[in-house]
Amino acid sequence: MVINTWNYTVANVEAWRILMQSPGGLGQTRNAVVEGINECEKQQCRLTVGYGGSPDERGETTLDAMVFDGKTMDVGAVAGLRTINDAIKAARLVLEHTHHTLLVGDSASDFAVSMGLKSESLVTPESKKMWEQWTAENCQPNFWRNVYPDPKISCGPYKPKLTEEILRHDNEIDHKSHDTIGMIAIDVESNIHAGTSTNGIIHKISGRVGDSPIPGSGAYADNEVGAAVATGDGDVMMRFLPSFMAVEAMRAGKPPAEAAEVGLRRILKHYKNFEGAVIAVDRLGTYGVACYGMKEFPFVVGSPANMDQPTRHEQVRCIPPQEEVNVVKL
Ligand code: ASP
């Protein structure tokens, strides 16, 4: 089976096609995840995967991606790519041709080019326009705090504000402009691959890396148990490794739907104002999905249940909003 976040049908259809190139999908899960996700990168799934979306403060689109092999526990990931659109393929190259886990920034792009991927600008007229509009609106919203000039009304450059009391505000950023693809593929012998790709969060501070390329946060897989992928406010989510938590909860005996909730509930103990979703699948292909900060969360499942039309759309209702805690003294 193949399952992925959001309503990214193109990715699921492509992954399923690849998986079915061998009986029971045997030996194809890595190809399925990489090619399925790459389809989203090429088609700029909702402008949140691949080139031309989510410009950062400098107007650049940067990509993060990861591939996770649940059999070997090998991982390849890249972050902050400014010139490579096939981010998931770059992640695969890290997995297959290095002993490293995560390469970042322009050096990661250089690596990808040296291994045969194409270098190209990820900025498009559309992403430039998004950035220009943001600049024209005094750089609102943005991700700064405790700086001057006041980031709620002014653009940078900012300097640290030295106060005795540093206040932590829950994020008041518009949550609508980020939607990572996270995908899990499982073959008939329970070989699992999980993967992610994203252009992160719009208006992020240059250099920001999200949760998607972080093992255990954006994705985690273990053939003995199952896998999980996550999407949402990566800055908060990566502090809790929700994909790892989901897999470990399944290992401890929780069904996938409950396991998917574990990480989100842990985050909720500390942050009420975030948006996130976790998909958890056990090694037999039973899946469960949990979300918070939205009403519903859509996802796509490809499975042999209906061979005529293996790809179907589903959605779950999210955990209801918890009480706000706006300011916490550290
Ligand atoms: N988690 C991604 C990030 O923070 C964005 C998303 O999934 O919506 O980079």
Image: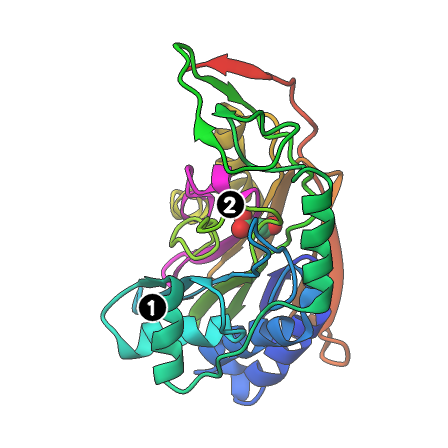
Picture coordinates of residue 133, whole percent (x, y): 74, 49
Q: How crowded is mark 1: few (under 14 residues within 10 Å), some or many (20 or more)?
A: few
The answer to whether residue 188 shows anywhere in this view is: no
For the residue marked with disc 1, what is the amino acid? Ser
Given the current orientation, which residue lies at the most extreme left position? 99
For the residue marked with disc 2, what is the amino acid? Ile
The answer to whether residue 41 shows anywhere in this view is: yes
Q: Residue at x 56, y 73 (%)?
A: 121
Q: Name the residue under label 2.
A: 205
Q: How crowded is mark 2: few (under 14 residues within 10 Å), some or many (20 or more)?
A: some
Picture coordinates of residue 74, whole percent (x, y): 31, 67
Q: Name the secondary structure under disc 2.
A: loop
From what the image shows, is residue 216 above or below residue 196?
A: above
Residue 179 versus residue 259: which sits nearer the camera? 179
Q: Residue 221's quadrant in the figure?
A: bottom left
Q: Residue at x 67, y 41 (%)?
A: 175
Q: Which residue is drawn at 51% across and 25% down?
A: 148
Residue 136 versus residue 40: which sits nearer the camera? 136
Q: Mark 1 points at which residue?
A: 107
